Image: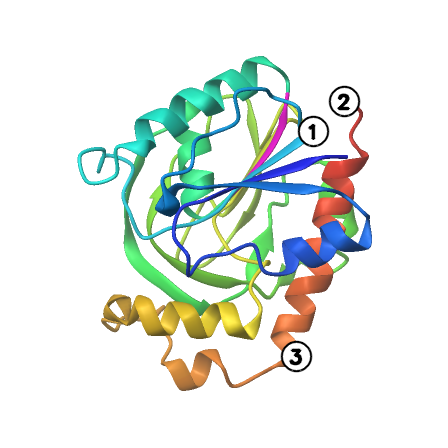
């Protein structure tokens, strides 16, 4: 299985995703928009992963590659490519599927549990025995649920934390891919987001428990194993 990753900024990289790909001997290629790299002309990959970033979806003047990226994703959807979007990536996918992306009532930054949707009877949820699962968050925007999508997780601060559409498109508002070094980069380059609030932790709280990163890695691997198992 070939994987292609769209990366928007250098400080939000693929983290544990690359460990998962290495464990499966899956080749990985990249489009790094911050280096002005172009999206592939040939869709010769099986799984597309869209990473996060601090920009908003309407900032096309400051980030003109957003127009190119959105058009590319529509082509991937039409070609039947499996897609996973993380944080900003999930918002782009939700918008592509007709949803609205808008400021959330609260910023959500730090480790807060996500809860399985009790009404969603999807096989992916059976991989997680607990009703609530630790997850790392760094977002101020959210999205409405795309039509015909199945909601997977929510949190106290954010109703739509994850969805699946047609077993092809998966959106995760939260981050299971982060290693400790990924979070330290966020704290270095996006510290201005830590403006306080009921769902914003301090840097000390965020880095207090190393075991949370190991839990995130295990959950990410379960999730990506499921995505990879879906027939093309």
Mark in front: 2 vs 3: 2
Q: Do residues under tags 1 and 3 come within 8 Å of each other at their CB atoms? A: no
Give the extent of the magenta segment: 81-85
> In the image, 188: left or right of 111?
left
Helix, strand or loop status at disc 3: helix
> In the image, 180: left or right of 7?
right
Q: In this figure, which residue is indicated by the disc labeled 2? A: 232
Along the line of sight, which residue is nearer the eye, 172 or 85?
85
> In the image, 4: left or right of 146?
right
Q: Where is residue 190 in the image (x, y as percent from the top left)?
A: 30, 66
Q: In this figure, which residue is indicated by the disc labeled 3? A: 211
Q: Which of marks 1 and 3 is nearer the N terminus?
A: 1
Residue at the spot 77% in from the left edge and 35% down from the top edge: 1
Helix, strand or loop status at disc 1: loop
Q: Position of residue 149 (x, y in %)?
A: 55, 27
- Residue 98 lies, with reference to residue 177, above or below; the image says above
Q: Where is residue 156 in the image (x, y as percent from the top left)?
A: 44, 59
């Amino acid at each position: 299985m070939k994987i292609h990753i769209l990366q928007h900024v250098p400080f939000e990289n693929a983290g544990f995703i690359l460990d998962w790909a290495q464990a499966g001997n899956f080749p990985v290629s990249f489009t790094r928009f911050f280096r002005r790299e172009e999206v592939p002309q040939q869709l010769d990959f099986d799984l597309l992963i869209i990473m996060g970033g601090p920009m908003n979806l309407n900032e096309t003047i400051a980030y003109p590659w957003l127009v190119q990226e959105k058009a590319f994703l529509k082509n991937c959807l039409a070609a039947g490519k499996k897609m996973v979007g993380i944080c900003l990536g999930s918002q782009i996918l939700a918008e592509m599927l007709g949803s609205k992306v808008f400021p959330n009532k609260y910023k959500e930054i730090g480790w807060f549990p996500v809860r399985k949707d009790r009404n969603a009877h999807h096989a992916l949820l059976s991989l997680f025995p607990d009703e609530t699962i630790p997850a790392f968050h760094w977002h101020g925007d959210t999205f409405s649920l795309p039509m015909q999508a199945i909601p997977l997780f929510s949190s106290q601060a954010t109703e739509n934390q994850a969805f699946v559409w047609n077993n092809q498109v998966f959106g995760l508002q939260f981050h299971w891919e982060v290693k400790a070094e990924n979070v330290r980069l966020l704290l270095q380059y996006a510290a201005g987001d830590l403006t306080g609030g009921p769902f914003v932790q301090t840097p000390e709280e965020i880095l207090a428990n190393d075991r949370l990163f190991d839990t995130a890695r295990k959950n990410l691997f379960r999730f990506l194993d499921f995505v990879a198992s879906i027939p093309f």
